Image: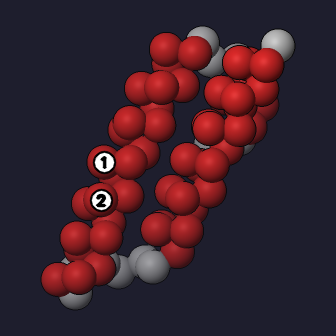
Amino acid sequence: MKANEMTAMTVEQLNEKVKELKTQLFTLRFQLATGQLQNHKQITDVKRDIARAKTVLRQKEQA
């Protein structure tokens, strides 16, 4: 997800998105541990999306 898409979201939507991404990250890590994960780049992508969402949340908080 792009940062400009996240800036259009409300604070509540961003909090839900972070929660959703964290559960997705947990699932991916579980798949990695059990050897079922095919694409390891997904973990990196999800981590970056979480960081983007938290950055936008912080920017909205300061504004």
In the drawing, what numbered circle is on residue 48? Answer: none
Residue at the far left in the pictured view: 34
Q: CA distance from mark 2 to mark 1?
A: 5 Å
Which residue type carries mark 2? Phe
Which residue is pictured at 46% across the width and 68% down the height?
Answer: 43
Rendered image quadrant of residue 27: bottom left
Residue 43, above or below 63: below
Which residue is pictured at 37% across the width and 38% down the height?
Answer: 20
Task: Give the left or right position of residue 26, taking residue 14 as reference.
Answer: left
Residue at the far right in the pictured view: 63
In the drawing, what numbered circle is on residue 23? Answer: 1
| Secondary structure under the numbered disc 2 in the rendered image | helix
Which residue is pictured at 55% across the width and 47% down the height?
Answer: 50
- Crowding around mark 2 (Cα neighbors within 10 Å: few <14, some 14 to 19, many 20+) is few
Rendered image quadrant of residue 53: top right
Residue 3, above or below 58: below
In the drawing, what numbered circle is on residue 26? Answer: 2
